Image (cartoon, grey):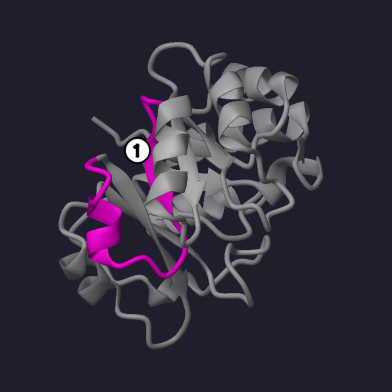
Amino acid sequence: MSHRTRIKICGLTREADVDDAVAAGADALGFVLYPRSPRAVVAERAGALARRLPPFVTPVLLFVNATPAEIDAGLQAVPQALLQFHGDETPEACTAPGRPYLRAARMAPGVDLLDLASRHPQATGLLLDAHVEGYGGGGKAFDWSLIPADVPCPVVLSGGLNPASVTDGVLRVRPWAVDVSSGVESAKGIKDAALMRRFCQAVRDADARAG
């Protein structure tokens, strides 16, 4: 049986965008609890948006160097959330909440993904994003040849993906999942329903081609 690449759409801020992302076929939706992000929402807002999700669509809370109290507030608002750590968090900080988590890796020459995976054995996956100033990929792609073939945990491909590029990403990397934010937006934090549909369909088409 062929692998079905999972789809995460990140940076949701509006009810209509949440509904459109679900209708497009997203498997997970990300809510950014990092105040400096243009897509940031507070915990209570994330909770209100996450309550719109049907069964089997996973809410993901994105944190950057958050305090334990901030993480707890997010989990109080979205108790079923998967956590995503996108800053300089230690393995101990990532496991402290006792919840499933993704560890983001900012890809650049010299980054040792195998070492990162070994230091995060409890991570449900590694999310690979571009290395830019600050945190987050900034809509930039990275060199996929930096990804070793033997990463011992699921890989989530992120960084500059859009409906035009995601097919190549799925076929070349064969990730467990793909993650998109700016590539399906009309403005920062404002998703475009047609772009989300095209993105999800491009992933499905790539899966069909991969067999």
Give, as a three-letter code, the residue at label 1.
Gly
Q: Residue 44: x, y in percent?
A: 58, 28
Q: Does residue 208 appear in the picture of this structure?
A: no
Residue 200 versus residue 108 in the image, above or below = above
For the point 46% across and 36% down, the residue is: 73
Residue 146 versus residue 40 in the image, above or below = below
For the point 29% across and 55% down, the residue is: 94
- The one nearer the camera, 166 or 132, is 132
- The one nearer the camera, 210 or 12, is 12
Residue 102 versus residue 142 in the image, above or below = above
Q: Does residue 25 appear in the picture of this structure?
A: yes
Residue that mark 1 sits on: 211
Give the magenta-colored segment's residue range: 78-98
Q: Residues within 10 Å of mark 1 (few under 14, many from 20)?
A: few
The quadrant holding residue 118 is bottom left
Q: Residue 5: x, y in percent?
A: 40, 38
Outermost residue to the bottom = 110
The quadrant holding residue 127 is bottom left
**Lateral position of residue 195 relative to residue 76, left or right:** right
Residue 83 falls within the magenta-colored stretch:
yes
Residue 116 versus residue 208 in the image, above or below = below
Outermost residue to the right = 187
- Quadrant for the C terminus in the image: top left
For the point 53% across and 22% down, the residue is: 50
- The one nearer the camera, 34 or 59, is 34
- Quadrant for the N terminus in the image: top left
- The one nearer the camera, 31 or 3, is 31
Secondary element under disc 1, as helix, strand or loop, is loop
Q: Residue 148: x, y in percent?
A: 29, 72
For the point 17% across and 52% down, the residue is: 122
